[in-house]
Amino acid sequence: MAEPMGFYTDTTVCIGCKACEVACKEWNQLPATNGGRSTLSGDSYDNTRRLDGIHWRHVKFIEQFDADRRQGRWLMMSDVCKHCVRAGCLEVCPTGAIIRTEFDTVVIQSDVCNGCRDCIGACPFGVIDVNPVSGTAQKCTLCYDRMRAGMTPACAQACPTASINFGTIRELKQTAQARVEQLHGRGERGAYLYGADDTMLGGLNSFYLLVDKPEIYGLPPDPKLPSRNLERGSVWSAIGAVAIGIAGLLSLRTRRTGDA
Amino acid sequence: MPSTFFTESPHWRWLIILYFFIGGLAGGCYFVASMIDLVGRPADRPLARLGYLIAFPAVVICGLLLIADLGRPERFWHMLLQSATWRPMLKTYSPMSFGAWGVLVFGGFAFLSFLGAFGRDERRHRLALLRPPALLGTIISVLGGLAGLFLASYTGVLLAVTNRPIWSDTSLLGALFVVSSASTSIALLLLLGSRRALLGGGLHALARFDRIVLVLELIMIAALIVSLGSLAGVWLNAWGALLVLGVVGLGIVVPLVLHARSHTPVSAAARAAALLVLVGGFLLRVVIVLSSETI
């Protein structure tokens, strides 16, 4: 297996240009929404709103302003599939359409997926959704086709501020750690890495440098694997089934005994 | 905000709600039928026959609902076979994968017992081998009954093994679904049994079975709400009202009162109680599925 590859996204240098969104759409031939007509959110410059089956990159605009709007700041973050080392979508996929590649990334094989949508609810980050054209679940492939050809993913290639960094996870972690220390040195004490260590789902192969709480960026503070409920849920189901069995036995056998 | 609120809904709506309901009836009716066949009186065998006659068509409908709900229905077989190698596709740790095989296996037992239900006919007496007390029939009924319980309960585990609010915030949905499947199945057998004026003794036993199961269901719903803790607050809306009034009130409490007042399971009150249990069971699945889907 090749060395694990991924993204490190430094949100502090994202300018919200959305070049990554456009490059992703163009390379992956993702369709426009609403027949190509603009659909404005009406309350933000963010008109994409969320990741889904036809938006595999999404630049979030987080607008933090006081009530009188004298004080405020913009936080921007180019969101994408996290390519979790322990991936919930891969766990639940019943067709084997979701695979881990030789680059340690997570890819949905569109020709295998049958659109059951189990992976959508299983993803802790709300990354996956159905592409209405293919009828299958889709998300970022980390440009698997480009990587196999030795190329940089389209979004990272297009990013003009090096907010999206692509490379080996080992190198990306070093770069990211150095950037955190640099920011701390400049007084930005709130800077930290989200998902860079293996405590979060074994590590996210697409991790982030943030300067506020994860929730502010629309990221879960404590993402978990869906399988955490498998054992307990099964045991309780078995207990429920045994209770039904006993109730049935009592109802039917009592009468039988009475009849005897 | 809990981490489950940062996820997306899988768009499981009416087809899946219907599948959960009809799948519960298929598994539950088969289980009750096998219980009657295995431990009940021989005189009650027509009731068991009714259960088998319901279970197989119901599981066929389930298969069709599941296929219709797929984004690519023509690829339904990818659930069972690897599309590239044609080898079996089974992930024991994926409830949907395990469940797909469960539907298939249960369907097989339901089909055999469906055939066995025609064994009382003189010309098809060999089919009687597929039902107890024949050895083969006993094996089929025991294994099919267990598969029926699996079909009735795994859907709750399937919901729990996601990251969605409510569904993955409790481990009790599978247990609740299996209990609810039993109550709705007994209600359906009571309803159809009384229409066919089947044996009163068997219906009395089923009515007693239903009362016990309804009380169990009430306990399970209370336990579910307790297990959700502060998250149960998301039901302080129309879904919560539907749960309390529709599922608990109309679907459990009123039928229990009607059962208590009715002296015979073929009375109008008993039939109304059975009908309300079925409505309550359906509403339970509506509330569980849609209250999370709409978050």
Image: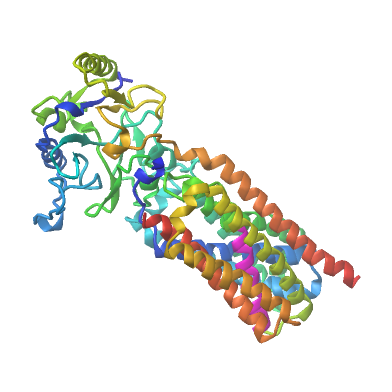
Where does the image place residue A6, in percent across and percent down from the top left? 26, 25
Query: Most extreme residue toward the right, as rendered?
Result: A260
Instruction: Decide if residue A173 is on the left or right side of residue A151.
Output: right
Per the picture, the main secondary structure of the magenta-coloured stretch is helix
- Which residue is at 28% across, 36% downward? A81
Residue B39 against residue A82 in the figure, above or below: below
- Which residue is at 27% across, 31% downward? A212
Where does the image place residue B159, in percent across and percent down from the top left? 48, 50
Specify the quadrant of the image occupied by residue B35.
bottom right
- Which residue is at 16% across, 35% downward? A73
Residue B98: tell me if it is visible: no
Residue B79 against residue A162 in the figure, above or below: below
Q: Give the quarter of the figure containing the C terminus of chain B.
A: bottom left
Where does the image place residue B186, in percent across and percent down from the top left? 65, 70
Residue A32 against residue A83 in the figure, above or below: below
Count of labels in the image: 0
Specify the quadrant of the image occupied by residue B255.
bottom right
Q: Give the quarter of the figure containing the N terminus of chain B.
A: top left
Q: Which residues are magenta?
A: B178-195
Magenta highlight on residue B193 = yes
Instruction: Decide if residue A81 is on the left or right side of residue A75.
Output: right
- Which residue is at 33% across, 20% downward? A1
Residue A105 against residue B160 in the figure, above or below: above
Magenta highlight on residue B189 = yes
